[in-house]
Image: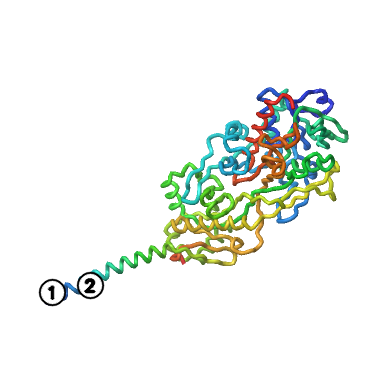
Amino acid sequence: MIFNDVNNILNKNFHTIIIGSGPAGISVAKKLEKKKISSLIVEAGSMESSSISQEEYEGKVIGDDYVDISASRLRQFGGTSNHWGGVCHPLEKHDFNKWPINKNDLDIYKDETMQILNLSGDFNVSKFNDNFNIISTKQSNVSLGKKYYDEFKVSKYLNIISNSFLENINFLNNQIQNIDIFKGKKKYNLKSKFYVLACGALENSRILLWNNYKQNIFDSNMPIGTYYHDHPTHDVAEGVLDLDKTYNYIYKNKLQNFFDPKCDPWLYLSPNQNFVRKKNILNNRVDIYYERYNSNYDYPNKVYKKLVCAAPNYVSKYLKKFPNQLVIRIESHLEQDLDLNNKIKLNFNKRDSFGVPTIELHWKRSKIVRDTSKTTLVNLAEFFAKENIGRLALKNYLFNNDYYRHKAGYHHMGGTSIGYTAKDSVVDKNLKVHSVKNLYVTGSSVFKTGGYANPTFTIIQLSLRLGEHLSQLNDI
Amino acid sequence: MKIFHKKRIFLKFLFGSVISIIFLKKKKLIDKNVIVFKTDNSVTWILNKNDI
């Protein structure tokens, strides 16, 4: 049911209250609904997007240039799924090396996750050459708010109240007694057995930090807000591919299923684990975008002209023979190394309209991020040249200390990471906050490491697993 | 005597040609696999030596 008046829910018994209605929150609620268990989602935003609501997300970033954190998240029903890019891929087996769970624990929820994201088929990874794998990703066009609006309207198990801001979590004896929410200017008190924070990586940390500041609940060593990470994403190279030779290589190695000439990015490659270990670099993905040769469009012309200057023999010998060439642009999409100094803090000098300190995000890319892109791209470019598949030009910042722009990412991860103890993590393998009996956290904030995969697929898997766990609990 | 001399010259020529072909082919193969870096204002091309 979609509730507008808090008075209509005060006398209802909900098994779980979920804070946040993004992909994580909706997935927990959907799993509980399947088990005929009633939950309530408390959404701070409205059922539609609103610029006033977005202002509450404003914050300050200290360190390297970063994305606008008020625009990278959506404060509305469906959360960030209302404006995401839709690229889906699960984490790889080795990405779980530092997690207390493994890939099999999440693979159980793969089919359900595919259904939620309107996807079909399978994800594949295959050998591209001795050092690289080729990856098939999937593109989801789902907006979870739109997809599930009608279900929430009629279901007695799926309940939501919007424009309701979590003001306070009231703890007693290591468990939550109830929560205070603001709806309009009025304060209400809500109670359930279990509570789930599912507000995105930045907000999950902010809520825990703020409540800990007021009530001093958690172990002082618990690293709330720390080990924040993203997927640094940069334009790293451009170049030319000989399409005939590229197709020959793809068909000779039976890789055609990984390749759709109509899709852009055109190819996704990732260095394999042997290469990553041998070169001591981070996991990363190379996204190859094509830029069709077009005299009206400047970019391919510029690349082609640069190649004529740098490699006249190549152009005259090969490209004239094969006019079917493709100008490409390459983006590097990296896992970030864990740094204790990359963290979410409270900015007490600037508060939102409810008086809660806004976010002060400390974020920097280490030297290994740049080195990883360089090592990966040099190896790929050498392979393309040796096999005569094409020629790549790497941006000069990879070879010197010039400034380079963080282009995208928008994948807020960490802050309440999963682990074994309160010293190294905030939640345990069941996503329960260490030392609190009935508080759980889900979403990308629990990611210990980020791999190269876009996070939404894993967020939904983790949240379905949490829903399953909660459905087996009747009492604290 | 004359025939023997001509034969020797011809064999020398043949042997020289074979050696030259092998050498040149090998050199071309090596050149093809020599990677060079060529930098301009904004990018560094990674090329085969014989592209330039």
Task: State the image quarter where residue A432 is shown.
Answer: top right
Crowd tier of the residue under label 1, counting other residues whose Cα lies within 10 Å: few below 14, some 14–19, many 20 or above: few
Color theme of the render = rainbow
The disc placed on residue B3 is: 1
Q: Residue furthest left?
A: B1
Q: Position of residue A208 (x, y in %)?
A: 77, 41
User: Mark 2 Cα within 10 Å, few/some/many (few <14, many 20+)?
Assistant: few
Indicate the quadrant containing the N terminus of chain A: top left, top right, bottom left or bottom right. top right
Residue A112 is left or right of residue A127, and the answer is: right
- Tell whether label 2 touches label 1 (CB within 8 Å): no
Q: Secondary structure at mark 1?
A: helix
Residue found 84% across the figure and 35% down from its top: A182
- Number of numbered discs present? 2
Q: Give the percent coordinates (x, y) of residue A241.
A: 49, 55
The residue under label 1 is which amino acid type? Ile
Instruction: Identify the residue at image location x=67%, y=41%.
Output: A419
**Front-most of residues A25 and A280:** A280
Q: Which residue is mark 2?
A: B12
Is residue A180 visible in the rendered image? The answer is yes
Say which residue appears at 75% left-offset and 46% top-offset.
Answer: A70
Label 1 marks which chain's residue?
B
Q: Which three-letter amino acid code belongs to the residue tagged 2? A: Lys
Q: Mark 2 falls on what kind of element? A: helix
Residue A276 shown left or right of residue A349 in the figure: left
Tag of residue A196? none
The residue positioned 49% from the left and 65% from the top of the image is B36
**Whole-Å distance between the Cαs marked 1 and 2?**
14 Å
Drawn side of residue A320 relative to residue A167, left or right: left
Quadrant assignment for the C terminus of chain A: top right
State the image coordinates of residue A56 (x, y, percent, origin top left).
Answer: 80, 43
The one of A5 and B22 positioned closer to us in this rendering: B22
